[in-house]
């Protein structure tokens, strides 16, 4: 058996990085869209930020921290869809959404690929992205970091990056807060020059060049790029034994990628 | 003592009240508690050129595939466990919906609120900086008359989403139109009703008025009869969307639907022939037949 610090899978590293994105949020509604974000948020609540308010992803605030997709838990509140929009406008919320495209300015697209009038590929629609990004802290989760996702300009701006928010005026910029972009390769934010996308860390076993190659725009890369931290033993136990004993996370971030780092 | 009016009617009587070119709001949310029996009745009708306002699921997919929709107002269209609605996706990619208004979810709610309050618009932040305003240049901004220390903020003036008719599906109602939802979420059905000139309600079960609160908290009464023009009892009428706790989504049927919708024209025609060619009773019989099949 290998030592604990070398047995963390890529999915576990992503979960811990997502948890870190919610570490300093205090007592706000953590709203994860998708499996890894849900895992990361629950991990944060069990470790770095017990004050986080979490939901069942449907309509209940949960007092406990149940495994992914488990239904039974102590309920501490009611958060049906109409109330979600109230909280968005109120601002006490950090959402982590998916992103089909993200550009250098931190704009996100989940609406459609191609021309809006006649898209090559229609996606979900803009959903809550325009409102999220001008109202509450917003992060993105990208399970497959590639030049298809990270593009020079997104086709349709659903989520608003800092530059677009600034150009739209103070009402848009006041609460625009694009916090983190966590991918299967790296952690990024929008702290580069003119609020562009910047590389914060690369996951263990990933090189900076690999991230550059998988990014379709000139990524801001600081002189020293640290390695994303590995989950602690406690976090690994929580992920494996408590939150995701069935290993659902490997459907999003396959275990095989993690083995590459030891090779 | 005379009581309030009995508003019970048939599905066909509801559809008879609808006209070409109307703006119809459809309650529920994505693949949840959609008034599908009423949607299926529209599919069977000659109605055309409709403006559909919906947090969209298969209701939108079916209506656009049938060519009923001239204008679609949505923030998303999804089946959840099948993320992208294949009929909607196909219609968008083939350009068969003449007019498309894609909003932010919160803008959609705000537009309904403005209509419900008989206001021309309500201000909000959502939409600022995004392509929602680029793709919908008719949506204007408004400058706040107040300076709260951040200048006179320029906000989105979300136009009222006025509806000629709202169609919603709830769990229980009395014959007068008082109605409860028993599931986890009211969605926005009360807002749709207030944004509409007329609301037609389908329910799993019509009970007497006392029965509405005999085992159910009064807070679950979502609709008052003063907002409701017609009540239809349509058991399993939200199928194949959720109608918790009466039933959950029929995932198997949904997969069948999604496969046909993303398949060839022949495969879609076969689905239509099997499930949508008859009346609601025929539909429900075909659904039961599918459920009894092995596999």
Image: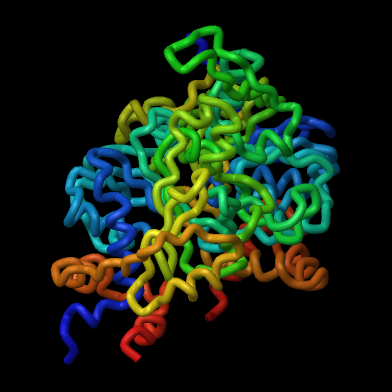
Asked which quadrant contains residue A81, the reply is top left
In the rendered view, tell whether residue B292 sits above or below residue B35.
Answer: below
Q: Which residue lies furthest to the left in this view?
A: A234
- Image quarter of the N terminus of chain A: bottom left
Q: Is residue B245 visible?
A: no
Q: Residue furthest front?
A: A223
A74 to the left or right of B132: left
Identity of the residue drawn at 82% across and 57% down: B94
- A87 vs A169, nearest the viewer: A169
In the rendered view, tell whether residue A232 sits above or below residue B95.
Answer: below
Residue A217 position within the rendered picture, expressed as x and y whole percent measured from the top left:
60, 61
- Image quarter of the C terminus of chain A: bottom left
Asked which quadrant contains residue B90, the reply is bottom right
In the rendered view, tell whether residue A55 sits above or below residue A226.
Answer: above
A7 to the left or right of B246: left
Identity of the residue drawn at 36% across and 79% down: A205
- A261 vs B191, nearest the viewer: A261
Q: Is residue B294 visible?
A: yes
Residue A129 position within the rendered picture, expressed as x and y whole percent measured from the top left:
53, 43
Identity of the residue drawn at 41% across and 66% down: A186
Residue A107 position within the rendered picture, expressed as x and y whole percent measured from the top left:
57, 48
- B116 vs B11, nearest the viewer: B116
Identity of the residue drawn at 37% across and 26% down: B210
Residue A2 position within the rendered picture, expressed as x and y whole percent measured from the top left:
18, 89
In the rendered view, tell whether residue B196 sits above or below residue B202.
Answer: above
**Color encoding of the figure:** rainbow
Asked which quadrant contains residue B9, the reply is top right
């Amino acid at each position: 058996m290998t030592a604990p610090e070398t047995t963390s899978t890529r999915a576990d590293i992503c979960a811990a990085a997502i948890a870190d994105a919610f570490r300093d949020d205090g007592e706000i509604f953590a709203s994860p869209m998708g499996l890894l974000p849900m895992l990361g948020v629950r991990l944060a609540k069990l470790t770095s930020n017990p004050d986080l308010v979490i939901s069942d992803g449907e309509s209940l605030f949960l007092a406990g921290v149940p495994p992914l997709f488990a239904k039974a838990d102590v309920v501490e509140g009611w958060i049906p869809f109409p109330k979600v929009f109230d909280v968005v406008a109120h601002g006490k919320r950090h959402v982590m959404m998916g992103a089909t495209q993200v550009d250098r300015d931190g704009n996100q697209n989940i609406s459609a690929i191609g021309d809006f009038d006649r898209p090559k590929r229609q996606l979900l629609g803009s959903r809550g992205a325009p409102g999220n990004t001008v109202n509450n802290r917003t992060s993105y989760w990208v399970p497959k970091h590639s030049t298809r996702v990270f593009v020079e300009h997104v086709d349709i701006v659903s989520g608003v990056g800092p530059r677009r928010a600034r150009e739209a005026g103070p009402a848009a910029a006041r609460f625009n807060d694009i916090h983190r972009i966590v991918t299967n390769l790296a952690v990024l934010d929008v702290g580069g020059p003119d609020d562009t996308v910047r590389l914060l860390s690369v996951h263990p076993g990933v090189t900076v060049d690999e991230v550059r190659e998988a990014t379709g725009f000139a990524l801001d890369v600081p002189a020293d790029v640290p390695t994303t931290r590995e989950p602690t033993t406690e976090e690994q136990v929580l992920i494996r034994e408590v939150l995701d004993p069935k290993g659902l996370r490997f459907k999003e971030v396959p275990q095989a990628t993690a083995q590459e780092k030891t090779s | 003592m005379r009581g309030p009016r009995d508003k019970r009617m048939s599905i066909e009587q509801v559809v008879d009240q609808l006209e070409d070119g109307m703006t119809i709001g459809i309650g529920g949310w994505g693949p949840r508690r959609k008034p599908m029996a009423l949607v299926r009745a529209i599919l069977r009708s000659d109605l055309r050129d409709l403006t559909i306002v919906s947090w969209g699921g298969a209701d939108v997919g079916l209506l656009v595939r049938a060519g009923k929709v001239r204008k679609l107002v949505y923030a998303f269209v999804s089946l959840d466990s099948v993320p992208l609605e294949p009929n909607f996706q196909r219609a968008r990619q083939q350009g068969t919906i003449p007019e498309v208004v894609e909003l932010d979810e919160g803008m959609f709610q705000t537009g309904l609120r403005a209509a419900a309050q008989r206001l021309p618009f309500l201000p909000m932040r959502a939409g600022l900086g995004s392509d929602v305003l680029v793709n919908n240049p008719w949506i204007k901004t408004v400058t706040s008359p107040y300076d709260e220390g951040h200048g006179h903020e320029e906000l989105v003036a979300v136009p009222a989403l006025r509806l000629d008719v709202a169609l919603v599906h709830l769990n229980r109602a009395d014959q007068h139109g008082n109605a409860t939802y028993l599931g986890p979420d009211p969605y926005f059905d009360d807002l749709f009703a207030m944004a509409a000139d007329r609301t037609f309600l389908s329910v799993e079960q019509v009970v007497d008025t006392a029965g509405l609160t005999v085992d159910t908290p009064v807070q679950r009464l979502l609709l008052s009869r003063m907002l409701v023009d017609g009540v239809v009892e349509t058991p399993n009428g939200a199928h194949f969307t959720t109608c918790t706790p009466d039933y959950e989504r029929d995932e198997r049927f949904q997969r069948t639907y999604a496969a046909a919708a993303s398949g060839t024209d022949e495969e879609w025609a076969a689905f239509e022939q099997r499930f949508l060619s008859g009346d609601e009773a025929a539909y429900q019989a075909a659904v039961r037949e599918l459920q009894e099949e092995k596999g």
